[in-house]
Amino acid sequence: MNKFSRLVFLAFLAVSASTAMADTPPADAASAASAPAPDSAAAPASADAAAAPAAPTEPQLIGTDKINSGDTAWMLTSTALVLMMTIPGLALFYGGMVRKKNVLATLMQSFAITCVVTLLWWLIGYSWAFTPGSPYLGGATRALFNGMVFMHDANKVTASHLALTIPESVYAMFQLTFAIITPALIAGAFADRMKFSAMLVFMSVWSLIVYSPIAHWVWEPSGWLAAKGVLDYAGGTVVHINAGIAGLASCLVLGKRVGYGKESMPPHNLVLTLIGASLLWVGWFGFNAGSAVAADGRAGMAMMATQIATAAAALAWMFAEWIVKGKPSVLGIASGAVAGLVAITPASGFVGPTPAVIIGLVAGVFCFLAATSLKSALGYDDSLDAFGVHGIGGIIGALLTGVFASKEISGLDGSVLTQLWGVGTTIIYGFVMSFIILKVIDMTIGLRVTEDQEREGLDISLHGEKVE
């Protein structure tokens, strides 16, 4: 624990120093105005554009009369739905797939990540992701949520420049739930074998130096990928490719589970897994339809696309497995549904119903192949298929967004080449940085539990508890 304590202290000092350095002047107004907002809802230029007031490029104090109660109510609901995706949704989805001796440790990971990322988001994560700064990192103006206020007597409230009809506190909370579930997804790749202390350090550092910068690149108008026109409605690159590639790095650095390929490792309770998948499906409406940041027609279209793509992917995985293995499994149809949810995420606010079906069908088949044939061929141990579902599904969704994006729905045209910029950048930066973080942790406090602890089970060896 002495090494662990020192590493946490050094990480805190590094974050504090980086906070002071990150408060750089905002990008010029022209580049900021040309980039899409998180829902990429920018309207085409018009002849009256010169006469219209410039769009705000940073959070501002506004009158409470400018807040839309319908939008605010929907975003409060969406925030609760997305938080439900991690606890209890992802916790149960992953918890049911591990062996009985590791179920509590798996649930603990999701719960602890929720707590840790919440405080890091307050500390500096939100400010680095969603305030203007350089093209690569936001400033420190919202560190400790400084300046995010509600003034009752003055009838004033701060609003983000990315969501002018809701309080900034609601927008920051909504984006927090994305920041929470992304590292929690990674945990599926290294299930059954990472030390709890190492997991806490990895997720803390990763959320600050990988998640927040990529969120800034794609979703903040001054971000360099936003300026290039990369489309990501609700997190195909920022969340799923990002988590999936970090998961691949994790399982490669850690190595295979003891007995992998030699011993049977069936899921201990698929009832929990199906309940978890169902909660993810319901919560995902907050994820995708909530990314409209308004209670409007685009949110409704995103909800429809999400439902249709998920159903198509679940059936595609089910039938592919039926053909290959002779029987359709509960785990298969649940995994297919998640693959569809992942793939439609970047496209949900850009496509109509028929493209959503195509995206779902492609994701269901290819994620099935990635989670079975590809994993077997390459020999890595992605315990719960974090890379096979989220990494591959995110790539499919991001690229097909470039194919099917509808200008009628979003006001924007898609480009596969532009989407490749977003996909390639996220893969390279996410993998390299994750690999480095993991190696540093391994050389200091160590990443992996001992073989005896792994065989005994992480519930008892790490937490002193077990499921009877």
Image: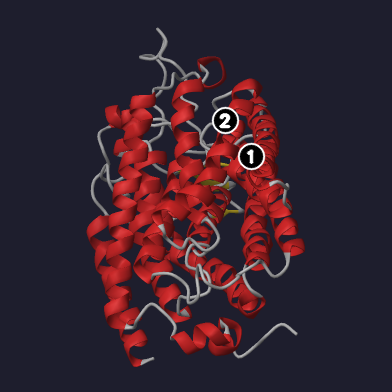
Residue at image x 29%, y 59%? 433
The answer to whether 447 is drawn above or below residue 216 in the figure is below
Q: Is residue 6 left or right of residue 46?
A: left
Of tags 1 and 2, the one toward the viewer is 1
**Quick one: SS at disc 1?**
helix
Pointer 1: residues within 10 angstroms few (<14), some, or many (20+)? some
What residue sits right under mark 2 in the picture? 359
**Quick one: SS at disc 2?**
helix
The answer to whether 23 is drawn above or below residue 2 in the figure is above
Q: Foreground: 126 or 370?
A: 370
What residue sits right under mark 1 in the picture? 320
The answer to whether 61 is drawn above or below residue 41 in the figure is below
Q: Is residue 209 left or right of residue 357?
A: left
Give the percent coordinates (x, y) of residue 384.
55, 60
Q: Amino acid at mark 2?
A: Ile
Q: Foreground: 346 or 153?
A: 346
Quarter of the figure with the C terminus:
bottom right
Residue at image x 73%, y 47%? 328
Give the percent coordinates (x, y) of residue 198.
41, 77
- Quarter of the image for residue 448 reads bottom left
